[in-house]
Amino acid sequence: MAKEKKNSLFDRKIIIRLLRENFKQHARWYICATISMLLIAGTTSASAWIMRDVVKQIISGHDFNMVITIASMVAAIFITKGLATFFQTFFLSRAGNSIVAAQQRKIYARLMQQDVSFYQNLGSSDLLVRVTHNANAARSIIDTIVTTFVRDLFSVIGLMSVMLVQNFTLSTIALTVGPLAFLGIRLVLKRVRGLMEKELSSIAEIIKVMQETSIGIRVVKAFSLECLMKSRMEKAITEVEQRANGIASLEAATNPIMETLAGIAIAMVIVFSGYMATKQPGIEAQLMAFITALLLAYEPAKRLANVRVKIESGMIGARMMFEILDHPITIMEDKKAKDLPQGCGEIVFRNVTFAYTDNHHVLEDINLIFPAGKMTTLVGPSGSGKSTMINLIMRLYDPTKGHIEIDGLNIRKATFKSLRDKMSYVGQDTFLFNGTVYYNIALGKPGSTEKEVIDAAKAANAHDFILGLIKGYDTNVGDNGINISGGQRQRIAIARAMLRNSEILILDEATSALDSESESLIKEALARLTKNRTTIVIAHRLSTIAAADKIVVMKDGQIVEEGKQNELLSRQYGLYKRLFNLQFHNPKQIIYEDIHSDTAKADKSYHTENTLNNALLYEETTEKKPL
């Protein structure tokens, strides 16, 4: 009971908020629609009232001109009602469509303000449902409230007034069924809420399966996952169908309740009307007006009784919409933020510590300088914190402790636009938008000329393969570049970064998907691109970073070595040297280092035995190699 009261209070707050945030903005449409609905309510009541005069004149038959006048009035009433109905629909549609568009803009604008962790915690299919379905849910609630509590409520009030004026006794009999109807509808609401929540989650699953099928179709085909994907889709569709049927059944249940109670009320009225007609001659006209008003009041009264069910159907979507709009923004632009100063892009980490969760630090007390106009490479085992440093530089996250400066300014004090304009980024998971090759490159610098786009492609050594595509620069790359190879996608992404021509260039495994020939072409391009530019490179392929001005070696969120490559290789037991030997197939050197490492000295009984076994295995395999 307490939970139900809490939900009811929350629902009222949502409804008030929906009306407050949307009604004023679209007031002119709703005012026009309200006037139209009041006309509908008035003409509906007038059509019942005039039936008394119609019956009187027809029965008396003494004044045919009055019959013509009354007939004209009836025609005028229904013509006015028809026009008012048209304008009600027109104005409500304009307001409703505007509300959907406004809510979708607000939701998307809010999503653009969220940080990366928000998207990691909420699936894209869930977001799609919230942006599309939930905005329409807001419109549905407002439309239901406006039409029900203006047109239907005033229609019922007007018709009840006619009934009371014509015959108070019969009105009392007819109105006894109202409380019973609303009690029956209340019982339906509890089931509707739960079914709607489950239906929305099933719709999100359908979208999720479609996304995974479209993006991962190669994997689906390669691993013969068609049956599995069909099974997942079948389950999701079946759940949506079952829950939709459940909601339809519950909504349909309100009609029999109203039909049964209305039938009983009308039957009772007919019995008493017949009885009164035998006792009070001449009352027939009043009874006709009363019965007409009663019958006309039935439909709007039924909609009034059913309004809670309709509102509850849309309330789930409205709650989910406000969850997005009210979700706190963790990465905020400072109210006094200013543009980054002009400079060559020197980046400084000052005592930076970062944790994705409270109990696990990914970076620990990092102090590091990325020299302006120089190439700095981050290397180290997976999970050592390299990509996290990139994320912090781009301010996708904020440090838990310490701060980062670019050209002397704490990036938390800088505007987002000036910060992002100062950087170009090419990631290991190359993302391309669904569109042409030209479009994807041009995104690096909106408003760029065709010559600039082509020059960037040439600089990235992508121009020749682009011309070899079916439509050249006008070739559609498909969803996330599915129509072209991985290496081609990366060269397009590099061309996009080159076109941006920013002071800071970030390359996160930018050559990981390239074959040797493509890698050679990219090296040439990067040599041109990185000249006199602050460049940060994350690379596991150490062959790509030989020319780096500075190599930073990371392990477990800390910097363990830094310097030029020749300096790092001169260290006998350094981590960089170990990684270098491992990658360039010098296992004897690795084994030697293992035996003489601090770990081996600490636990000779196990570690030395292990490395000696590796040495024996190495010797055995090399002896068996054919000459």
Image (cartoon, grey):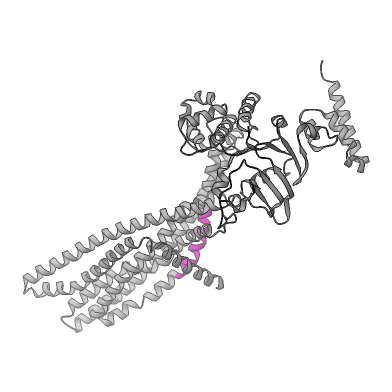
User: What range is drawn magenta here?
Assistant: 186-201
Is 564 placed above or below 310 here?
Answer: above
Quarter where residue 36 is shown: bottom left
Q: Is residue 626 visible?
A: yes
User: Can you name the residue that lies furthest to the front here?
Assistant: 342
User: Can you name the residue that lies furthest to the right here?
Assistant: 605
Answer with left or right where residue 502 lies relative to residue 184. right
| Residue 208, position as x, y percentages in the image | 54, 46
| Residue 522, position as x, y percentages in the image | 62, 28
Looking at the figure, which quarter contains the C terminus? top right
Examine the structure image and report whether residue 187 is included in the region drawn in magenta: yes
| Residue 67, position as x, y percentages in the image | 10, 70
Examine the structure image and report whether residue 220 is included in the region drawn in magenta: no
Q: Main secondary structure of the magenta part?
A: helix
**Residue at 11% in and 72% down:** 58
**Residue at 56% in and 49% down:** 339
Q: Is residue 385 visible?
A: no
| Residue 424, position as x, y percentages in the image | 58, 39
Answer with left or right where residue 369 lies relative to residue 149. right
User: Can you name the residue that lies furthest to the bottom here?
Assistant: 279
